[in-house]
Image: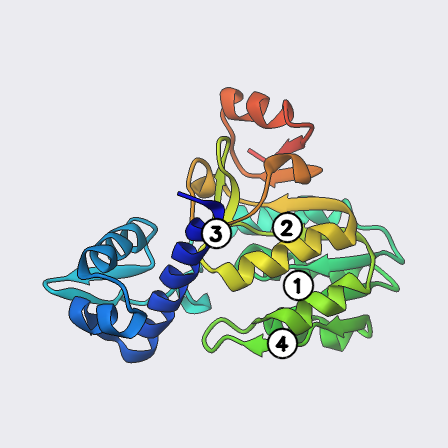
Amino acid sequence: MANEDILFAEERKMQITEYINKNKKATANELSKNFKVSIATIRNDLRDLEKTGLIMRTHGGAMVKSKSSQELDLSSRKYNITAKQNIAKAALNLVDDGDTLILDSGTTIHELAKILYKKKELTIITNDITCVSILEPNNFNIVMLGGVIHNGFHWSSGIHAQKMLHELSADKSFLSAGGISLERGLSVGLLSLSDIKSSMIKCAAQNILLCDNSKFEKHKLAKFSNICDIDILITDFIDNYTRTSIEEHGVDVLSID
């Protein structure tokens, strides 16, 4: 399959997911007519989307997965909170007074935002509304990236946010991922979110990934970078094989277990 065909297929899957989330459910016939592809193609798309956890297949179609869409909404991502808090504490040690930081979206990033008050004179670039609400009382210089706000997720994305990032530079970015695969790199469940993450990586001098071990050897819909694009990985637990394999890509691995 040509690269443009692969891209078109991934864009169609994203649009199918958004359609199902908006309408709560859809039949294969309905999707086939709407996206002008065969029912067999729709069934293959739905099978792939179900594997990544984006939707739930039903007899004759698909429906919104309970308490989820492309990525679990914030109210559903409060698990493993102690590990995320410990990862955030380790990340704080990498922040210097006066730094310009990029903060990605995600619950582990939120835990870092909660303790950044311990640092002084920070400039923070973010697309995450929750991060802004946490950080605003601290008198930091905050740059909110514009774009489309995704209901239920509290972050922005799109071409306008990417254009802003192209004109900015940062000392460090703190990023999250839906999946980390040695073979397939870093990924998330939304193409629109993967685009802005890629732009964040290009904008920062040093890129730091905050990720608990539940994300290892998982792959979501949209890849946003190779492992070698990350400078430091902070995680809670990592086996020796995975650690060595990631370090071979030039990444410093910090584990808090």
Position of residue 94 in the picture relative to residue 149 (left or right): right
Q: Position of residue 13 (x, y in %)?
A: 36, 60
Which class describes the residues within 10 Å of circle 2: few (<14), some (14-19), or many (20+)? many
Task: Pick whichever of labels 3 and 4 is earlier in the sequence.
Answer: 3
Asked whether 56 or 135 is in front, the reply is 56
Q: Which residue is mark 1?
A: 114
Above-or-below relation of 230 to 141: above
Quadrant of residue 168 within the rendered picture? bottom right
- Is there a contact, CB below 8 Å, between mark 3 and mark 4? no
Q: Which of disc 3 and disc 2 is earlier in sequence?
A: 3
Secondary structure at numbered mark 2:
helix
| Amino acid of disc 1 | Lys
Instruction: Give the left or right position of residue 135, taking residue 82 as reference.
Output: right
Q: Quadrant of the N terminus?
A: top left
- In terms of image quadrants, where is residue 114? bottom right
Marker disc for residue 147: 4
Q: Amino acid at mark 3?
A: Glu
Residue toward you, 112 or 145: 145
